[in-house]
Amino acid sequence: MKTSQKGINLIVSFEGFSAKPYLDSAGIPTIGYGNTYYPGGMKVTMKDPAITKEQGVELFATVLPIYENIVNSKVKIELNQNQFDALVSHSYNTGGSETLFSLVNKKAEEQVIRNWFTTKYITAGGRILNGLIRRRKAEADVFFAK
């Protein structure tokens, strides 16, 4: 599967765009739409030159398939588009979660999956972040949207 425009909008709405490198909430150099590395695996550094919004879109488009592939390879059941988009958004932000993929594969009850979404991966740098709480809730809402 591929991420829909709705899924892309979900990701970029939470990532935002930064032309210049900045340290994310976990202290990792980041640029564009939440990118911590470039195609080929080179990490973003604070000394990297600024990029244009168009370059940010190109960077996002080259990196997004990595996270789509993670979801496609880890999830063994058939997903609807909303479920796929929510899992790609989560993976784009966190790198993916074996526990979440396992719950999905086991077809755990909605409340179990929703609880997992809303209580895990909500911290950075040892602090609970409201932005991550909002993102996890939004991902859960998309996952269970009909």
Image (cartoon, rainbow, N blue to C red):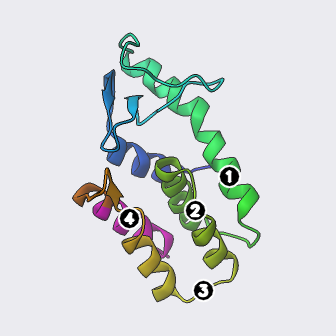
Q: CA distance from mark 1 to mark 3?
A: 20 Å
Name the mark on residue 97. 2
- Please give the residue where the numbered disc 3 appears in the rendered image: 108
Question: x, y (%) of residue 107?
Answer: 65, 84
- 3D distance between C-alphas at marks 1 and 2: 10 Å
Which residue type carries mark 4? Arg
- Please tell me which of labels 1 and 3 falls first in the chain: 1
Q: Which mark is residue 136?
A: 4
Mark 1 residue element:
helix
Label 4 neighbourhood size at 10 Å, few (<14), some (14-19), many (20+)? many
Cα separation, mark 4 vs mark 1, equals 18 Å
Q: Earlier in the sequence, mark 3 or mark 2?
A: 2
Magenta-highlighted residues = 133-146
Which element carries disc 2, helix, strand or loop? loop
Magenta highlight on residue 129 = no
User: Mark 3 belongs to which amino acid?
Assistant: Ala
Foreground tag (1 vs 2):
2
Label 3 to label 4: alpha-carbon separation = 17 Å
Name above or below for residue 10 compared with residue 32.
below
Disc 1 target residue: 70
Name which of mark 4 and mark 1 comes first in the sequence.
1
Q: Could you tell me which secondary element the residue under label 3 belongs to?
A: loop
Q: Amino acid at mark 2?
A: Ser
Q: Dot 4 lies on which element? A: helix
Rendered location of residue 59, percent (x, y): 52, 26
How far apart are the alpha carbons under marks 4 and 2? Answer: 13 Å
- Circles 4 and 1, Cβ within 8 Å, touching? The answer is no
Residue 33 in the image: state x and y as whole percent: 40, 34
Residue depicted at x 51% and y 32% = 60
